[in-house]
Image: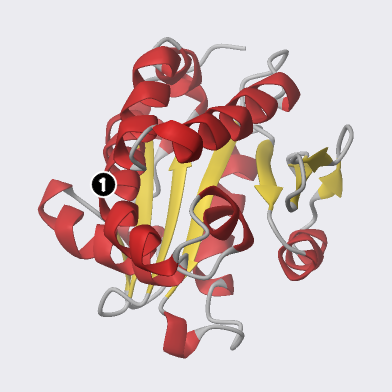
Amino acid sequence: MDIPGRAAHLPEPHELPEGVRLATAADLDRLVALLSAAFQTDPLTEWILPDPIARRAALPSFFEVFVELSLTHGGILLGGDYETALLFTSPVSTERAGERAEEIQWRLAAAVGGGGAGSMLLTILGMQAAHHPTDRAHYYISFAAVRPDLQRRGILAGMVWPLLQLADRHGFPIYTEASSAAGAAAGLHFGFSPIGSVITLPNGPSLRPLWREPQ
């Protein structure tokens, strides 16, 4: 398949719902704050950093890495006044992002303070990499965040549809991992299907790999 440039794999402003836009580097600080707040009580971050105080201190540096990664190799859909965010990498950039895997791993491990937390994080990243499909170019949704006081209201749907429509238009599948049963159920609603085996972390939570064919 002929893959055009990165810009072709980002939504155009007129394709986005009212109140949704593509984030830029100028949004980094507030995006990091949103992600840190949204994932303060997430099963994965609690597994990596059981101490809530240490977790609160570490998450900004952790999410700064992912925000930079998406801004460089894909995009971030931002909704409202930093109420929701959807981080993704695009098909054209998947290989380039993969070439930075070692750098990204160690930046993330340093963000959580090394030691046991760093080791647990590297365990997650290694298991994710082992399960991540590599045979077809695809979009990859890494994080979907909703401000804590707005969670469980269904407002993330407005962020997801533009990416689904973009992937369908270009004929690309989408891959993601759900960190909760609710997230997996939402994925099924959007046309995703389970792929491969569940990623079960040692004495920890599970990730459910999901795949959506273009429609």
Question: Looking at the rendering, in which quadrant would you find the N terminus?
Answer: top right
Question: On screen, 214 above or below 45?
Answer: above
**Residue 62 visible here:** yes
Q: Nearer the viewer, residue 182 or 87?
A: 182
- Name the one closer to the observer, 213 or 40: 40
Q: At x 52% / y 44%, what residue is drawn?
A: 142
- Percent across and percent down for residue 111 are 31, 39
Residue pictured at 73% horizontal, 63% vertical:
180
Q: Name the residue at 61% across, 85% down.
A: 152
Of the pair 178 and 80, the residue shown nearer to us: 178
In the rendered structure, the answer to whether residue 12 lies left or right of residue 94 reads left
Q: In the image, is residue 185 above or below residue 47?
A: below
Q: Please state the horizontal and vertical placement of residue 89, each as a whole percent of the image.
A: 46, 35
Residue 123 screen position, x and y as percent: 61, 29
Q: How many marks?
A: 1
Residue shown at 16% from the left, 58% from the top: 29
Task: Judge whether residue 7 can be spotted in this image.
Answer: no
Q: Quadrant of residue 209?
A: top right
**Residue 67 sits above or below residue 38 on the image:** above
Q: Nearer the viewer, residue 35 or 159?
A: 35
Specify whether 139 is left or right of 66: right
Q: Describe residue 215's horizontal placement relative to residue 160 as left or right.
A: right
Q: Where is mark 1, residue-wise?
A: 61
